Amino acid sequence: MGGLAKKITHHLVTLVLVIVLCTTIVEGTKHVSIKNRLGSGRNMTLHCQSKDNDLGKQNIAYGDEFGWDFSDNVAGTTLFFCDLGWENVEEFHFDAYSFARDRVRCGDAGCSWLVSIEGIYGLNEQTGYWEFMYQWPN
């Protein structure tokens, strides 16, 4: 094989490897859902964003939820964070999706959260159980 053919083969192999690695990281669309379970008559405000996407401020009534769809970035650093408030908590910051933490815990579909009087629960898709993830500050 000549020098040019070796270079072309090397570049093709490299390109195929990059495509395979990227597809293992970017596995399709995910969904995050945050549900208000604070109790009857208790609304919450929610402002979620990533480095690139500001989802705006939401007012969520008891029993309702807010959600969005996205894809993980190729670098595997996707992060959506939220500021949440309700009558007992003026502002609470939490990560609604972190690739490093949630890629396995939330599964392929995305992450589900329940906001309650005690704090915030996240659904672990691996076990099927709601895990207590965040406690309100005193």
Image (cartoon, rainbow, N blue to C red):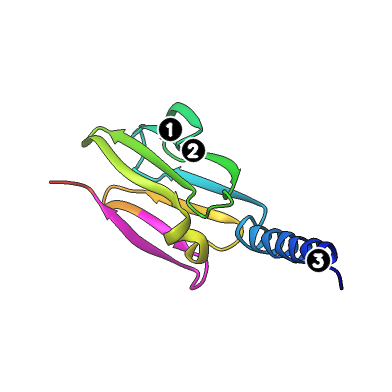
**What kind of residue is marked 1?**
Ala
What residue appears at the point 39 percent right and 42 percent down from the top-left corner? 81
- Tag 1–tag 2 contact (CB < 8 Å): yes
Question: In what quadrant of the picture does the N terminus appear?
Answer: bottom right
**What kind of residue is marked 3?**
Gly
Q: On screen, 71 above or below 124?
A: above
- Few, some or many residues within 10 Å of mark 2 (<14, 14–19, 20+): few
Relative horizontal placement of residue 19, taking residue 65 as reference (left or right): right
Tag 3 residue:
3
Tag 2 residue:
64
In-front residue for pair 71/48: 71
Q: In x, y percent, where is residue 7?
A: 77, 63
Per the rendered image, the range of residues in magenta is 121-135
Q: In x, y percent, where is residue 17?
A: 70, 65
Q: In x, y percent, where is residue 49?
A: 44, 35
- Few, some or many residues within 10 Å of mark 1 (<14, 14–19, 20+): some
**What kind of residue is marked 2?**
Asp
Tag 1 residue:
61
- Select label 1 or label 3 by which is in front: 3
What residue appears at the point 49 percent right and 38 percent down from the top-left corner? 64
Relative horizontal placement of residue 110, taking residue 85 as reference (left or right): right
Residue 134 counted in the magenta span: yes
Give the structural element (helix, strand or loop) at label 1: loop
- Few, some or many residues within 10 Å of mark 3 (<14, 14–19, 20+): few
Q: Image quarter for residue 133?
A: bottom left
In-front residue for pair 58/79: 79
